[in-house]
Amino acid sequence: MHLKYESQLREPLVTGNKDYHQVTEDICRPIEAKPTKLWYVGFFIAVTLLMFGVYSVYREVTYGIGQWNLNKTIGWGWDITNFVWWVGIGHAGTLISAILLLFRQGWRTGVNRAAEAMTIFAVMCAGQFPIFHMGRVWMAFFVLPYPNTRGPLWTNFNSPLLWDVFAISTYFTVSLLFWYSGLIPDFATVRDRAKTKLRKLLYGVASFGWTGSTKHWQRHESLSLVLAGLSTPLVLSVHTIVSFDFATSVIPGWHTTIFPPYFVAGAVFSGFAMVQTLMLMLRKIFVLEDYITLGHIEAMNKVIVLTGSIVGCAYLTELFMGWYSQNKYEGYTFWYSRANLFSPYGWSYWGMMACNVISPQLFWSRKLRRNLFVTFFMSIIVNIGMWFERFVIIVTSLYRDYLPSSWSPYYSPSIWEMGFYAGTFGLFFTCFFLFAKYFPVIAIAEIKYVLKVSGDNYKAGVEKEEKMPVEEFVHEYAH
Amino acid sequence: MASIRAQFEIPGKMKTWSIALIAIGILAFIIGLVTKATHGEHGKVEFIGTLMYNSIFFTLVCNASMFFICATTLAMGGWQIAFRRVPEAISTVVPWFGGITWLILFYVVVIDHNHHIYHWLDEKAVDGDNILRGKKGFLNPTFYLVWTTLAIGLWILLGRRMRKLSSQADEKAMDAEEGQRYIWKNTVSAALFIVWFALTVGSTIPWLWQMSIDAHWYSTMYSWYTFASSFVSGMSLVALFVIYLKNKGYLEFTTQEHLHDIGKFMFAFSIFWTYLWFSQYMLIWYANIPEETVYFQHRVLGPYKGIFFLNLIINFVCPILILMKRGAKRNYTLITFMAVLIIFGHWVDFYQMVMGSLSKEHVTLGWLDFGIAAFFVGMIIMIVGKSLASKPLVAKYHPYLKESIIHHT
């Protein structure tokens, strides 16, 4: 006999005594109700920021890169810092949906939909920076490999910057497909509940005529597995290649072999922090505490302390090798330009250390992992720290060249550089608000899938199996 | 209601094989001692180097079992409980191999003070070399020995703590509260082990033991690479023992489903190893800085070329092609074959990491290497066999055992 069972020692993933219908009701409610005032206020702020970003980009396109405060040696500043920061954030969604699917982590079902949406929006934001950093953005098509008359250099396949183009566009495409294929059955649910014709039509088109037949489900499941298989290497490849942008060079502080795995760990770290920020708000505003439980929050905090510590291990390894190599330039970069608090950018290094390595250690404590305020605060701190990390890597390695004559004056961004960054926040939250309004923010079908194993009411029903001596259990249920 | 066949009895063949392999190893050691170790500096370095990489490799491989236990414990895994006693038994080898490794390293660093192996032991050379002089704070016999002792000692102690906790699940059924407390105690102990593991295997120990053979060279990736190499071999070793016990009719709760997941670990971490290999190699190749490329010079272009590519073929090409399919991971014969291949492949990897630096002019791989490896393999069979027999094969009252029984992928 096949048994759906998990130990009662595990926290239920769905609380509040739900049945299938209740799940649908709870998750569809925000889509079917009128948006709240809070939604309008948030949306308005997001769009305003976006407009400011658009204007900042307009200045840059019209007047050139001179609108930014990049200088002689700091050719990459806020732009590339922001690019890497956003790409990093865009790692959690696919990690949750693909890698945690392969690891059979049931708690992913509560958060995967919103995390995947976040991934897609974050990658969209990230993409803006290298594109507009080109200066002559109308030449952006130069990166595309097609037969051309521009000579042997273009398209330059030897450049990690070009690998980025492929890696990120592939990642974006697969993440989008993955996200969307998961949405299809849920769109169909919304369609079937629609009260107006327009709504029925729009959600009907979006759900591609899903009927929920066994055949549909069968294809859907195999597609999900194939996409999970494809996404798993992609999660690693994207940030690996972003790290190559730095590590293939000979610049001290950039050229270090640990970069690829450490960048991936850092990306997951910041991605989870962003998921945490969004989820804590979402569960509160949409009353989804039964689906995004303290258990979910705790699980994500565990990922944060794990990846934060991996990143910490890598920072210390680098710092150690800066000394161990006895290479003057390495030593100068790591011990003078970074670890020395009183050097021009020393503050950013210690900001990074405090936010990324030291403070996440709080999450060794179970109590703090389950504390919503601490979690929310930490989720912001981590992303500040991860922004510092990229700033540290880029700016502290560039601001002093080998010759003192090529040292740069102190770099601080112009208002248009900051505006561009603010604009991507606008883009991100505009998209996220629209998503929250029109899309089921939790995967309805997937919650139903785990409900009968991990729902609190169903878990209470396996009391008999829990108490059964193991010999009898085997006799009854082993396959 | 059938009772569980939980008591492993060591078959005569297992004993014979282990003793035979150990005897071969001792014979190889003696012949090596006579023909190599006493015949000039080069022979001696080859002899000691062979002992070193074998002992380091097999210690880390067995220690990987405890890493697996602790990592799955922290991840609150339930699927592995059905066969968890197997990695536990493998981890009981760590005190033995750790001891052997410690003795060999103690001999190299303190008794023999062999600067042909660790160049940084040559005080005169160090004084005349700015770079080595600068590293003295890390590369010195006292720190080396203290840290090595601490590393091995705590692996042993923390591992024992985990195994002791595991035995509690043999005693009596636990109610919800006791179960909760039991899981919590396991979690805390596992966390301690993992943190120490990160501070040793994940960083300092491979720098000291292996990387410092090339005293000038450095790579930040080195330790994670070493970890990946030993972990994937460790999983393969677990697979071998699980299959062995299944074939003997034990571990009735462990099914193809569990094997499939072990196979996934073997597959995934083979790819992970390749990822780290590629990242390290490609970045050094691309930047082309002489003080870094020096490490790969004779490995790619010199006498180690064959070994270099063999390493990639066995540890990457074979796993990706053979283990990719679902069917392959559920096939006992194929997994056995792949597990042996992967362990051999990473043994070759350790060979090139150590001997590639000690004997740059010619590849020494020969009877001595296989002989010494035979000793370690024989020891593993003997000690793991004994440990398996000393405890029930299944922790009957473990709170997650039932999840593991109905586990399917």
Image (cartoon, grey):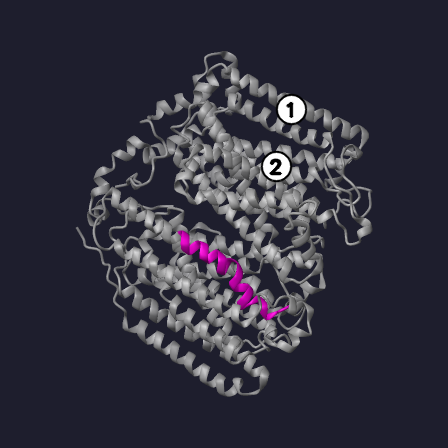
As displayed, is residue B189 above or below residue B121? above
Between B173 and A97, the one lying in front of the other is: B173
Q: Which mark is residue A86?
A: 2
Residue A170 appears at what percent x and percent y?
A: 61, 40
Q: Which mark is residue B247?
A: none
Residue A375 appears at what percent x and percent y?
A: 47, 35
Query: How dense is the environment of label 1, judged by Cα within 10 Å: few (below 14), some, or many (20 and up)?
Result: many
Q: Quadrant of residue A252?
A: bottom right
Tell me which segment is drawn in magenta: B191-216
Tag in front: 2 or 1: 1
Residue type pointed to by label 2: Trp
Between A39 and B368, the one lying in front of the other is: A39
Residue B242 appears anywhere in the view: no
Residue type pointed to by label 1: Leu
Q: Are marks 2 and 1 on the same chain?
A: yes
Left or right? Give the position of A347 relative to B77: right
Cα separation, mark 2 vs mark 1, equals 16 Å
By secondary structure, the bulk of the magenta-drawn segment is best described as: helix
User: Which numbered disc, 2 or 1, marks the residue that appears first in the sequence?
Assistant: 1
| Residue drawn at point x = 38 percent, y = 33 percent | A449
Left or right? Give the position of B367 relative to B10: right
Is B204 magenta? The answer is yes
Q: Quadrant of the N terminus of chain A?
A: top left
Q: Mark 1 highlights which residue?
A: A49
Say which element carries label 1: helix
